[in-house]
Image (cartoon, rainbow, N blue to C red):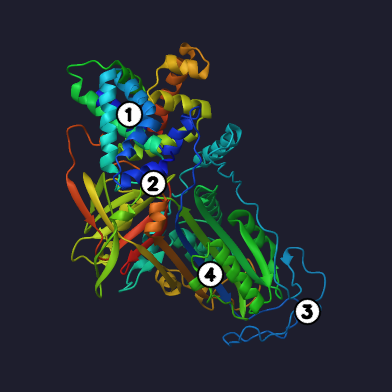
Amino acid sequence: MEDSRIVELYWRRDESAIAETQRKYGGFCYTVARNILSDRQDAEECVSDTWLRAWNAMPPQRPRLLRPWLGKVVRNLAINRWEKNRAQKRYSGVELLLDELADAIPSPQTLEKHMEAEELGALISAWLRGLDSDDRTLFLRRYWNGESLKELARLLGESPGRLAQRTYRLRMALKAELERNGVSL
Amino acid sequence: MKDERSRKLYDGITNVDDELVEEAQADKSRHNRTWLKWAALAACLVIVAAGAIKLWPSRAPTQQQEPGTQQEPGTQQEPGTQEEHEPSPPPDTIEPYEPICFQLAGPAYPGVVPYPGENADSQAYELWADYLRSLRERPTGYKNGLDGYLAESTVQFLSGAGTENRVYSPLNVYMALAMLAEITDGDSRQQLLDLLGSDSIESLRDQAHAVFEASYRDDGLVTTVLSNSLWLRNDMTYSQTAADTLAEQYYAFTFRGEMGSDEYNKMLRDWLSSQTGGLLDDYINDVELSPETVLALASTVYYKAGWADEFFEGGTSPDVFHATDGDVERDFMHQTREGTVYRGDGFTAVSKRMHEGGWMWLILPDEGTDVNAVLAGDMMPFLLNGGTGASQGYYNVHLSLPKFDVSSRMDLADGLCALGVTDVFGSTADFTPITDGEGVFVDKVEHAARVTVDEEGVEAAAYTVIPAPGAAPPGDEPEDYYFTLNRPFLFAITGTDGLPLFVGVVNQP
């Protein structure tokens, strides 16, 4: 079913909207949640929460593209779940992800510029557009989808070691870009 | 601490543009996607120089007029009836020509790679990405020295709108004035250089060229189209060097025709209309060059880009707008999202992101504070700093914005005089770089601009941004802030680099 028809179901308060969403994007959402939380049960709960969130958000919202929209909800719910539970549980997925991202944290800037997530997203988008499409895909599949290097190696036909180098280079490049723009986090 | 900063980076990555996320999933699916509709804005400026017309060679054609006398267009001789002119013009001049309207060679525009579309192969996408990269790598710093002009001229031209709306495009006027400086000399030129903050015509030329290049983008995703043109008589001699400089540095087209004729006026109107997407046709239909016009400069800016986040049609509702001359009912669009509210001296402000860069600032004077007071106060420094340094808070912002479509037309002559540009309007005007015609002076400087923000435009630019559940600092639920633009307010649209493209006062949405 097309995204616009699914959104229409939400707007009509038709509960089959959730079933249709689950059919089309359930696997995708689960994978993202699982990549981040590395726990089957937590990932499943996170996806259920996503459907509830979608039901409550539409209307008034009318997303054009459901996949990125749902993915953003999943990422936000997953990271919140990690924040809340990290004292009791270990989530290797997100911890690894955040560890890697720590490489890209810009050094303290003389002219400090604090950015909202949205503004930071715009800056990172602009940076991504300047990369080769292979690098762009690699970065987003690793840090947006949260896929492991092993999975990505299969997908991209390269060795995990080689990909580790490439992702490191990308993190350094992002760090340089953030510093060039005077961003501090 | 490290976790917290990594977490912020994670949130930033969550917010990358949807199209990039889609692209990255490419092995799974590629969507057919209709592209966005747009918010569109346009401005044009026509500088008309009139004067006693000295013809080359020294032979008066039948349509020569004494300065100041009016002649209805269309009452001159028919094309083709002019006597043949003398040969052997000096090599550095544009010689008189047959009385027909035509365009001389157009300039070579900055190269543009069109957006290849959603289903393009990676090679086409790479070409476009290279183009975007070249845009990003354009030299920055060209705005240096412009702040004075931007602030002073905006205050000058937006103040005193009374109960009317007013829209001004600093970028548009800058381009036209820079061209005017090119074709004038002496004090006429010096006053323009002073206003535009340049110490020589060479540095102004370099800066204007850089501003043009930095602002111009037309790849189908974002359109910021600047156009410049020079309109000449076919029965006068002009400097080829001056026309070449305008073509090379300002990408100006040169036209020649029978000044004052219906045909030539129509050509000018068609050009203005096509360069502004038809948005200004109500004003353009009145544009007319009189037969005694020596030359005219015309500049346009046309900008369209989608909004990064949408208003929801279902949420729009009528409410009261407290206009200066009484209450009116208007449709208000509503949006709630977390974001920054800025606090300036006598006003509050929020900004909304445009798709692919650029911002719209909404500036609401405090209750009881006049828009003119805000204009004359800290507003321009605030905008030129992009809000940096202003006090600010992070809130759950409930934005209520009336739909508006505001436009205005004004003659900038008096305002320019007040800003110190006086000589071009008087008998001491010096146009020698382009013509040896005597007594040439600027007759009028007409500026029209329009900004349309309605539900269609905004809703259509549908980049969904979720009122991000994870965007706030953890455990720190932002407070509600109601930002309701239900009384006269100001707005500004800036490019990615903060250069104000349009600034306006909305007294009557």
* Residue B232 percent location from the top left of the image: 65, 71
Amino acid type at circle 1 is Tyr
Q: Earlier in the sequence, mark 2 or mark 3?
A: 3
- Disc 1 target residue: B10
Q: Earlier in the sequence, mark 1 or mark 2?
A: 1
Depth check: B41 or A62 in front?
A62
**Residue B381 visible from this viewpoint:** no
Depth check: A31 or B255 in front?
A31
Give the number of the mark in front: 2 or 4. 2
Q: Quadrant of residue B1?
A: top left
- Disc 2 target residue: B308
Give the number of the mark in front: 2 or 3. 2
- Disc 4 target residue: B46
Q: Earlier in the sequence, mark 4 or mark 3?
A: 4
Amino acid type at circle 2 is Ala
| Label 1–label 2 contact, CB within 8 A | no
Kindly report the distance in space between the C-alpha atoms of the residues bearing marks 4 and 3.
Answer: 28 Å
* A81 in relation to B413, above or below: above
Give the number of the mark in front: 4 or 3. 3
Kindly report the distance in space between the C-alpha atoms of the residues bearing marks 2 and 3.
Answer: 55 Å
